[in-house]
Image (cartoon, rainbow, N blue to C red):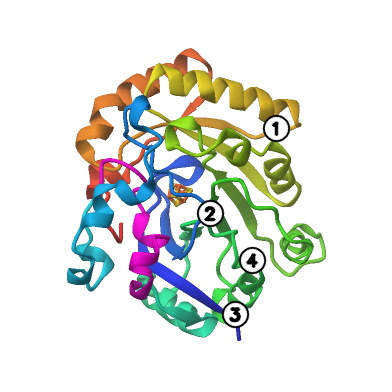
Amino acid sequence: MSKIKIAELFYSIQGEGRYMGVPSVFLRTFGCNFKCAGFGMPRDKISIEADDIAYTHANIESFMKYEDLPLVSTGCDSYASWHPAFKDLSPMLTSDAIVERTMEILPGNQWGDAHLVITGGEPLLGWQRAYPDLLNHPKMAGLKEITFETNGTQKLSEEFKEYLLQWQMPNMDFAREVTFSVSAKLPCSGEKWEEAILPEVVCEYEDVGTAYLKFVIATEQDFKDAECAIGAYRAAGFTGHIYLMPVGGVESVYTLNNRTVADLAMKNGLRYSDRLQVPLFKNEWGT
Ligand code: SF4
């Protein structure tokens, strides 16, 4: 039976993108290929190493569970889902155990109108081979919509592509809608353009589901970078929607620029994505 290292498994409202407002189970896998140390940093400090960020100086031993971890205003706001210092907070669970816990947290123990968000970390990094076991589980039969929240750098394996494509076949007993919510990392993340903006990878996601791009914006320079990236994705044949989303893992930062980013989106005919988890739940772990 397949196992997945799970950072968090919780029920909440999707705060971002296409499914904003939809009741959702969040399955946060452990591990990421990036660090995104630059978020919230001034441009001239962006080259700092992730290990210099305040959260790694926190007294890690004093945190026994995710809910107790501090929120951060710089760097990756889900740092504990990939930073090795927190790996012991994330158990390796069998697909049976994940499904049992999932059914427990769903209202009425059924999927109803809820959807599944597989997030991270980077959920397409190493777990692609484990998802069929999980999604084929009989108790998951009521699940009709799945979103992978990815940074758009991981190719899909041939086996996983084939697996996802089956739900689009007319002779299938039931259809499932698969969405790739691609948060492509601009230079403000601190990651290198050539490693973060990979249009050919994201175009492949469109072969097996719906894909959209989501750019985190704090400054005018970020928007200029987003425009460049959009040009590259479109040139490669990407047809999906584009969202601008304000930076802000903590409320004070989010409220500084959400209106500005909404205005930018309107002015440029792009979609705006809020981060509802910030005003509603303060972006706390488990929300
Ligand atoms: S890609 Fe996402 S999870 Fe990974 S470090 Fe960046 S913001 Fe965090």
Question: Which of the two discs, 1 and 2, labels the residue nearer the N terminus?
Answer: 2
Asked if 197 appears above or below 24 in the picture, the reply is: above
Q: Quadrant of residue 262?
A: top left
- The answer to the question of whether label 1 and label 3 lie on touching residues, with beta carbons closer than 8 A, is no
Q: Residues within 10 Å of mark 4 (few under 14, many from 20)?
A: some
Secondary structure of residue under mark 4: helix
| For residue 225, side relative to residue 44 (left or right) | right
The residue under label 1 is which amino acid type? Thr
How far apart in space, not on screen, are marks 3 and 4 (Cα)? 16 Å
Q: Quadrant of residue 198?
A: top right
The label on residue 137 is 3
Question: Which of the two discs, 1 and 3, labels the residue nearer the N terminus?
Answer: 3
How far apart in space, not on screen, are marks 1 and 3 (Cα)? 33 Å
Residue 80 is inside the magenta segment:
yes
The residue under label 4 is which amino acid type? Gln
Q: Nearer the viewer, residue 61 or 178?
A: 61
Secondary structure of residue under mark 2: loop
Q: Start and end of the magenta stretch?
A: 72-89
The label on residue 128 is 4
| For residue 158, side relative to residue 174 (left or right) | right
Specify the quadrant that holds the N terminus: bottom right
Q: Residues within 10 Å of mark 1 (few under 14, many from 20)?
A: some
The residue under label 3 is which amino acid type? His
Residue 148 on image: x %, y %? 56, 54
Q: Which residue is mark 2?
A: 33
- Mark 2 vs ligand 1: CB below 8 Å: yes
How far apart in space, not on screen, are marks 1 and 2 (Cα)? 26 Å
Residue at screen point 56% across, 58% down? 146
Secondary structure of residue under mark 1: loop
Q: Which residue is mark 1?
A: 239
